[in-house]
Amino acid sequence: MKEGTVRFDAAGATVQLPVGTRPAPEPEEAGVPELLLPVVRSGTGFYVLLGVLVGTIVWGLVAYLNQLKYGLIVTGLRSYFSWGLYITNFVFFIGVSHAGTLISAILRVTGADWRRPITRMAEVITGVALLVGAPMVIIDLGRPERLFNLFLHGRLQSPLLWDVISVTTYLFGSLVYLYLPMIPDLAALYPHLETRRPILARVYRALSLGWRDTPEQHRLLEKTISVMAIVIMPVAVSVHTVVSYIFSMTMREGWHSSIFGPYFVIGAIYSGIAAIIVAMWIFRRVYRLERYITEIHFRKLGYLLLAVGLVYFYTTFSEYLTMFYTGKGPERRLVTDLFVGRFAGVFWTGMALTFVPVVVAAFARWTGVTGLVLGSFVANVGMWLKRYIIITPTLANPFMPIQNVPADYAVYRPTWVEWSITAAAVATFVLLYVLFSKLFPIVSMWETRDLVADSHAKGVRG
């Protein structure tokens, strides 16, 4: 082991190993920092979960191959409905991606020290959600090779091309923003995996870019991360704004609205915060991170969920009140369909699941962490339904009925193919997230060292 190799001892402190010294042989987990334990060991539950997720993904792949073979006729997409579950999933996952980069960047720029144990969890959600959400557009095309037409024949004035550019930029920026704070931890992983997983250890060593834990390196890293945080915030806001333009730049009733930009962004932040809360609770329980993720973290994110949820309720109320009060023709039919017609069940269920958690967050002192986590999970189910409500009812109410179309083509019924691919998308999201936590510390070690030491006496700083 070379001079200057960085490692963390069991307490999480940095140790510089001098020339010619190697760590003494250790038992499998002796001397391994607490935050590295999930990386060096895996229980039966992990492999059971892995099997379930892989099985779900394989079934989704079978469904997609069936779609490639027979075409979109195997789905519920017909003359009226060119978009359905696939675009619902796309908008949902792009929204959830705001969990990490945007929220983490805001908390970092504002100097909120309490965010340190949860930033990596949030930032991973961003990368994984983008990797899962973006391919949904290709699946919706029916023939994936048609994607190249967007580049060969695309027009710069098209919101579809804007969307491709913004999502690609956001994905690249988010991965860089995730990678930068991981550099010190990658250097710390190497000595602990050098004998257990030598190939993986060498990968970590290369990715650590020669990190030696010097004050100059820390200063440069902090400065770079701060710059990236400032840069990534407007990019994140622009992404879901551009996604909303795909709808609002059309003349379709229910979509053509100037409020769609902020409406989509606020909804994305709301679902992102809810996703972080659920992820925090799961990792806290499974990896026993109670020392790092405390009730204070849930309480503070609960306040954020409440504040953003109230703003989202206001924008939702304004949107539907305007449609109801001034609607004519197709818009009036759309509002009737939503409030008391064929989509009323989905509409009111989505509204209840989306906004009841706001009430739960308002009374988090009495409902506790469990109530907040359940409310956050329900909120994301509601937000998925909200995306479905935005897309499907509008397509069911065109300006003029399409001529000579079978009656059942005017009703959207997702098939087993669409549901299977949707389940596979969720399974892929969970699988990538879990695999990341088995390859890298899910809580930043170098950012929480001092914070954990202080928390024994003072609690987590707010």
Image (tube, helix red, strand yellow):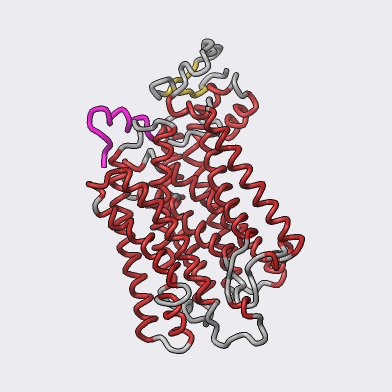
**Does residue 201 appear left or right of residue 214 in this picture?**
right
The residue sitting at 48% across, 76% down in the picture is 255
Horizontal and vertical percent position of residue 324: 37, 82
Q: Is residue 58 above or below residue 83?
A: above
70 and 358: which is toward the camera: 70
Q: Is residue 457 above or below residue 340?
A: above
Q: Main secondary structure of the magenta part?
A: helix
> Looking at this rendering, what residue extends furthest in the right direction?
69
Q: Position of residue 418 (x, y in %)?
A: 62, 60
Residue at image position (61%, 68%) is 161
Was residue 318 drawn as part of the magenta stretch in this picture? Answer: no
* Quadrant in the rendering for residue 14: top left
| Rendering coords of residue 288 (x, y %) | 40, 30
Of 295 and 190, which appears nearest the observer?
A: 295
Relative placement, left or right, of 61 versus 41 is right
Q: Magenta segment range?
A: 447-462
Left or right of residue 244: residue 194: right
